[in-house]
């Protein structure tokens, strides 16, 4: 409701958004794009809570150069969102 056209002040705040992301190696790019958009920080500024659970798949990108490229800037994006109040939780994918 927070972003709907004509939302009242009451509708804009007090919400809880929980995101669980499991995208098999694309999490690095997605996190950078979400941080760049500023949308989660905007929700927090409006008076909402955001919990972002990310399942990391470090080895799903098998090419080391591509993995380094995808991970570049990822930590900065996470820190940017943490600074505005996004609560990050990590999960790690393990295969037997």
Image (tube, rainbow, N blue to C red):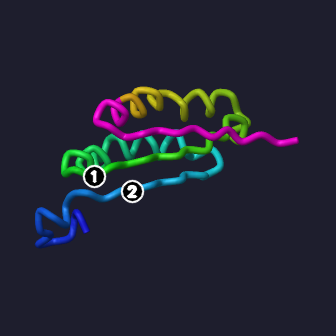
Q: Is residue 91 left or right of residue 15?
A: right
Between 64 and 15, the one nearer to me in the picture: 15
User: As displayed, is residue 48 above or below residue 7?
Assistant: above
Between 47 and 19, the one nearer to me in the picture: 47
Residue 1: x and y, percent? 25, 69
Report the number of numbered marks: 2
User: As displayed, is residue 67 above or below residue 33?
Assistant: above
Neighbours of disc 2 within 10 Å: few (<14), some (14-19), many (20+)? some
Q: Which residue is mark 1?
A: 48
Neighbours of disc 1 within 10 Å: few (<14), some (14-19), many (20+)? some
The stretch in magenta equals 80-96
The picture quadrant where one finds residue 68 is: top right
Q: Can you say which quadrant of the picture contains the C terminus?
A: top right
Q: Which residue is mark 2?
A: 17
Residue 7: x and y, percent? 15, 69
Between 15 and 33, the one nearer to me in the picture: 15
Of helix, strand and loop, which one carries label 2? strand
Q: Tell me the residue at 26%/47% (across/down).
A: 44
Per the model, the C-alpha gap separating discs 1 and 2 is 8 Å
Residue 63: x and y, percent? 70, 33
């Amino acid at each position: 409701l927070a972003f709907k056209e004509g939302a009242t002040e009451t509708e804009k705040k007090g919400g809880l958004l929980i995101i669980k992301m499991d995208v098999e190696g694309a999490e690095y790019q997605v996190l950078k794009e979400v941080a760049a958009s500023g949308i989660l920080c905007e929700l927090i500024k409006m008076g909402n809570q955001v919990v972002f659970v990310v399942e990391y798949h470090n080895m799903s990108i098998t090419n080391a150069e591509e993995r380094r490229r995808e991970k570049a800037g990822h930590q900065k994006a996470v820190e940017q969102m943490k600074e505005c109040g996004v609560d990050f939780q990590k999960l790690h994918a393990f295969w037997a």
